[in-house]
Image (tube, rainbow, N blue to C red):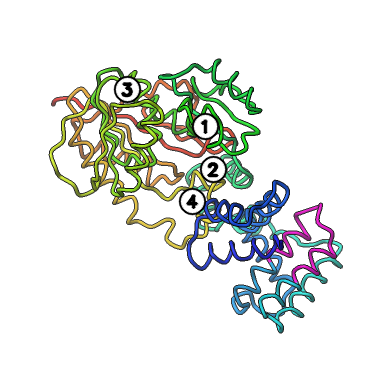
Amino acid sequence: MNIRNIALIILLNIERDGAYSALALNNSIKENKLNKTDSSFLSALVYGVLERQITLDYIIKQYSKIPLRKIELKTKVILRLGILQLVFMDKVPDSAAVNESVILAKKHKLMKSAGFINGVLRSVTRAETKYTLPDKSKDTEYYYSVKYSCPRDLVSLWLKAYGEDVTVGILENLSGRPQLTARVNTLKTTCEKLIAELESEGVKAEKSELCENALVLKNTGSIEGLKAYKNGEFYIQDIASQLCVKALNPQPNDVLIDVCAAPGGKSFTAAQYMKNRGKIFSFDIYEHKLKLISSTAKRLGIDIIRTDIRNAEKDTRELPLADKVLCDVPCSGLGVLSRKPEIRYKKDLLSDELHELQYRILLNSAENTAYGGTLVYSTCTLNPAENIENVNRFLNENPDFKPEKLNLNIKSVIDEPDNVLTLFPNGKNDGFFIAKFKREKL
């Protein structure tokens, strides 16, 4: 089994066809029936290249006489894999990294490229200093872009929006998988009981200090195979997402609308706060995602969720006015780059069209909020245009909505009003933005 070849195929699928890294990786592991050791090596190769792509290309340019833009894609990906192993993976012998890269080129009939790849990689092995970062004093943005393999426009955005200290914190959390967190299904069990049950299945579970009824999981193996999971005693949900629902503060017998509900985690958590009493309308534009919400709700023992296809931007069908409306909009995903490292290389990542779409969804959602009701707007991104700028515009143009304090007992890292919170990725939670409003009669 040639793990490097599988990695090459996955990376080509991601770059050529827009495949999602986690999905492509998991499918390959299952299809090739890889053991734990091979799976770990494959993951290290795929995520390593995705997380360091700009850095790897910077190194290639230092050793290649051929301009990067003229190197054929497959050859370039093999070089990235080879340099990753030589420079950033201590346990891989240099000889293996070079030889296997050449073998990989020949396997894909890249005969002319094989010698080129061999030459570049051997030059890297001979160099006493493998590469030197750009001069920070001359170009701070370029320095951080290369060091952390982050596109320059993102570095520039964060430096201007949040300052250098916060930006470095974001950049340092772009690599490595964040901790896995679960939401305890309080309709079926308690934290203490679930921790004990998971422990009996070999899973280490600890309470999160950031949110009640949230657990940090380790040594899970296959989540779907766990008895507690099959029995509906928990589901996977990031802490930031859980805090978003806590901010909304659903109560028993509320009418709640989740306008962009898939995959359903926030609806499920809301149902627990509501003690499975009241009504939750969970909407999405894809039928297969709604079926997934319904089947998971059944596993969790939740029967107050009603699903339906609805376009949150354009659908003007009359809905019951809701006590609570959750408007978690499609976004650029800059807060979850550690989970989806390939996102950072998308060309339209900072498109102006996106925050306009979000604003239209927010306006449409506001229409369904009852007077005296609560509206929460949220994203999993770190972009002021999608976050605080949309919030300020909404408050300016909709005088019947007022800021409402979040009461999450979490100190904001940056200076912002008490009705909004920007969570930055830190290994414990994803990057996330939450804003809360109350509707009042004028």
Name the main secondary structure of what is drawn in magenta.
helix
Please give the count of numbered marks on the rendered protein: 4
Q: What stretch is highlighted in magenta?
A: 80-101
Asked if the residues shown at circle 4 and circle 2 are in contact, with their CB atoms under 8 angstroms apart, the answer is no
Residue nearest the observer in this picture, 100 or 179? 100
Label 4 crowd bin: few (<14), some (14–19), many (20+), radius 10 Å: some
Q: Please give left or right for residue 316 compared with residue 356 in the image.
A: left
Q: Name the residue under label 4.
A: 157
- SS at badge 1: loop
Of labels 4 and 2, earlier in sequence is 4
In the rendered image, residue 438, in percent from the top left (x then y), is placed at 25, 26
N-terminal label among 1 and 2: 2
Distance Cα–Cα, label 4 vs label 3: 35 Å
Q: What element carries label 3?
A: loop
Q: What residue type is labelled 2?
A: Gly
Q: Which of 239 and 308 is in front in this view?
A: 308
Where is mark 2, residue-wise? 163
Image quarter of residue 278: top left
Marks 3 and 2, how far apart in space?
Answer: 35 Å
Q: Which amino acid does label 4 sit on?
A: Leu
- Which label was assigned to residue 250? 3
Q: Mark 1 points at which residue?
A: 413
